[in-house]
Image: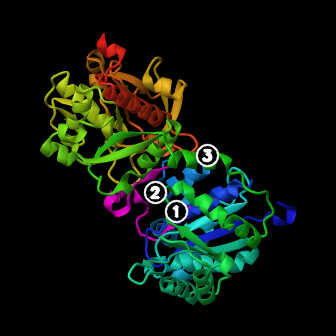
Amino acid sequence: MTDSEKQCKHIFVTGGVVSALGKGIASASIGLLLKSRGLSVTLQKFDPYLNVDPGTMNPFQHGEVFVLDDGAETDLDLGHYERFLDEHLSQKHNVTSGRVYETIIQRERRGDYLGATVQVIPHVTNEIKTRLRRVESGNGKVDVIITEIGGTVGDIEGQPFLEAIRQMRLELGESNSLFIHLTLVPYIASAGELKTKPTQHSVRQLREIGIQPDILLCRSPEPLDDSVRNKIGLFCNTPSEAVISALDVKSIYEVPLQFHRQDLDNLICRKLQITCPPPDLAAWEKMVAKTLHPSREVKIAICGKYVNLHDAYKSIIESFVHAGVENDAHVEMVWVSSEDIRREGADKFLNDVDGLLIPGGFGERGVEGKIEAIRFVREHHIPFLGICLGMQCAVIEYARDVLGWENAHSHEFHRELEYPVISLMAEQKSVIDMGGTMRLGAYPCLLSERSKSRQAYGMSQVSERHRHRFEFNNEFREQLETAGLKVTGESPDKKLVEIVEIPDHPWFVGVQFHPELKSRPLKAHPLFREFVRAALQNLDNRLVGNPVENEEVKQ
């Protein structure tokens, strides 16, 4: 960029007609395209709901809570941002109405407004604008900031955010700001046509509050032909070349390539008066090709209680995609309800899978089914990966079925226990508030030599993200290790158990942290990569009629 172009550019992404059109993927894809052209790019999400953050929300309400290195509990779109950009974001990259209003009310109580009447305009919109610009300078100069406004145009709670970005256009100027609107162009099968009216109404709502979209991303199951693009452009006051088809694709990682083929990144650079080289997408194209055309397939079960809502496990799903690419395989994810296993038995659901993952979660519902599933794969030598609560369930299962401690359980669910192998962390015992008070964010972990985890990572110390209140109870560590459940990862002060393994099992690893939060499309997380590799080996053994055992088991 030339000296005259050094001012930070802002791109605002809004959505219309219906929710769940993929604003997060669209924003992340635009970020990837601009970064691949040599620009410094960051993304942020502004959510209109009144919760301070999604940390206390039910997954059925919000989907996955994505945790950042600094401990921020954020919207799952932050996961897409990090994965596409391959960069770590922070608390300031996710803002909610709840956080905005919390700040304003605290200021009012302190008297910071000097007796003024506190109103949505200017106080709320000014606070939103302040937070919009907070990421302009971080670890270095940012060339482009992409801000996704959550919700759908027309929602009452989103109006202050739209007013704030309208004002930002006046402050920044047209060459430094860009409005991109993602909308729906449905295909009506009975008419055999794509219908543009919903898009027209959505853009009209934006224009009524003073926002004219510069670019329209039109989500549709069919490509937009020139007549449809021209019609949308005419009625939405947008040049037809700025009407971009956001076609349904098999993999979300195709979206940046789809946008690039329609010249979207060049269009953005022209409108923002940015001079930069063409994008280098070779590595991304290779990854997408491997995603779409794997040479093998492996079946891995995901056993939890939110399996009917896949967004609750979004990062796990993407981690399996990444791990599949590095193993040249497609991971078929088999969704198994832990409550079904409790009612009908593990054999019915797990007898033909090549691996089992138990994800994190909270609450007692479904726990007994998870424990039964773990017992099944441990006894049948099927590769296993347990995450957070999944690791804790593995400890409980081992204590019950190997050591014979029938009363073994977690203090999260029962207080009066003879064998509380999982207990509340010491620093959590005085905590009253639920939001933002768990052990959150990135912490170091030391890995034992000759462990599967150490072999996977290829290093002796790693940093992983956490989200939990309960932990492995060290009071029972010696007995569990003597019985064969080895601690292979712990905090540097040796007080917290981070990883447990069964050495004489093909692959049995439980981790207290959330490895899925750091997996990337071009660099799969080591634990997921090796777990999928173990599952493929299990598949090979089954195909040739051998039991799924390693040499240590046979000995």
- Residue carrying label 1: 24
Closest to the observer: 368 or 117?
Answer: 368
* Residue at x 62%, y 79% (from the top left corner): 226
- 445 over 363 or under it: above or below: above
- 245 over 455 or under it: above or below: below
* Residue at x 57%, y 76% (from the top left corner): 125
Q: Amino acid at mark 1?
A: Gly
- Which label was assigned to residue 286? 3
Q: Earlier in the sequence, mark 2 or mark 3?
A: 2
Task: Please report the bounds of the magenta region as a residue range.
Answer: 42-70
Q: Residues within 10 Å of mark 2 (few under 14, many from 20)?
A: many
Q: Amino acid at mark 3?
A: Lys
Say which element carries label 2: loop
Closest to the observer: 174 or 308?
Answer: 308
Q: Position of residue 425 (x, y in %)?
A: 34, 37
Q: Position of residue 555 (x, y in %)?
A: 30, 10
Q: Residue furthest top?
A: 555
- Left or right of 264 on screen, residue 445: left
Question: Label 1, label 2: how many angstroms apart (C-alpha)?
Answer: 9 Å
- 11 over 120 or under it: above or below: above
